[in-house]
Amino acid sequence: MIVPKTFYQRADVVQIAKDLLGKYLVTHFDGKITSGIIVETEAYSGFCDKASHAYGERFTKRTEVMYRQGGTAYIYLCYGVHSLFNIVTNKAGIPDAVLIRGILPAEGLNVMLLRTGKQKTTGKIGLGPGKASKLLGIHFSATGSPVTFLEENQPKPLIWVEDRGNLVTESEIMASPRIGVDYAGEDAKLPWRFQLKKKCPSEKEHF
């Protein structure tokens, strides 16, 4: 089942970052379906979070997407190379977002290998936000696109999240400070990076 927009439009971005763990991030580009189990996320809380691109109500051509309604893709280019995929959350006007930091490849492994130029998978192939996006064919040009059905009877989005019934309990989640946000001062210490302690029961099937 495609995760509905109400899931993303809740007020607690930290909880949403946890709730995304175990769900499937799916893409459909150039007629090819690829997917991966979300195993690592980071939460960013808009106005008050110094690690957020929208901290202090910063509104630019890039961050404008963060002010849209929850369920919108916010994808930005990092170091001029990596497309980093985030999902905007909360109501329109509140720029919260969750960064997808890692996936466990599930469907379309051959396509993923072609995208990365590799001949076989390794245990860390989908760990890291740039790697996750590359595997799934996500490019920063898709920023602003919906990741769910924003209105009834719309065609399926190009990027979406599915809930396939993988139950993740609080005891299975490891929380730690976010990566690469030392500039955020005290906010860099917030334990808003979430990982599955055990990536997935079917991990051996993929690596």
Image: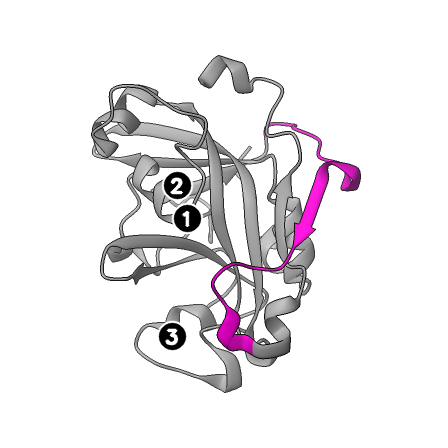
- Work out how far the residue at label 2 is from the one at label 3, CA to CA, in angstroms: 24 Å
The residue at the point 65 percent across, 28 percent down is 166
Say left or right for 195 vs 182. Answer: right
- Work out how far the residue at label 1 is from the one at label 2, CA to CA, in angstroms: 5 Å
Kindly identify which residue carries mark 3: 64
| Image spot of residue 87 (x, y percent) | 48, 55
Say left or right for 23 vs 165. Answer: left
Q: Residues within 10 Å of mark 2 (few under 14, many from 20)?
A: many
| Image spot of residue 129 (x, y percent) | 41, 48
Q: Is residue 1 above or below residue 139?
A: above
Secondary structure of residue under mark 3: helix
Label for residue 129?
A: 1
Q: Amino acid at mark 2?
A: Ala
Kindly identify which residue carries mark 2: 132
- Work out how far the residue at label 3 is from the one at label 1, CA to CA, in angstroms: 21 Å
Say left or right for 121 vs 207. Answer: left
Write the start and end of the magenta stretch as one range. 164-184
Magenta-span inclusion, residue 124: no
| Image spot of residue 1 (x, y percent) | 55, 32
Hey, which residue is sitting farthest right in the picture? 171
Mark sitting earlier along the chain (2/3): 3
Quarter occupied by residue 49: bottom right
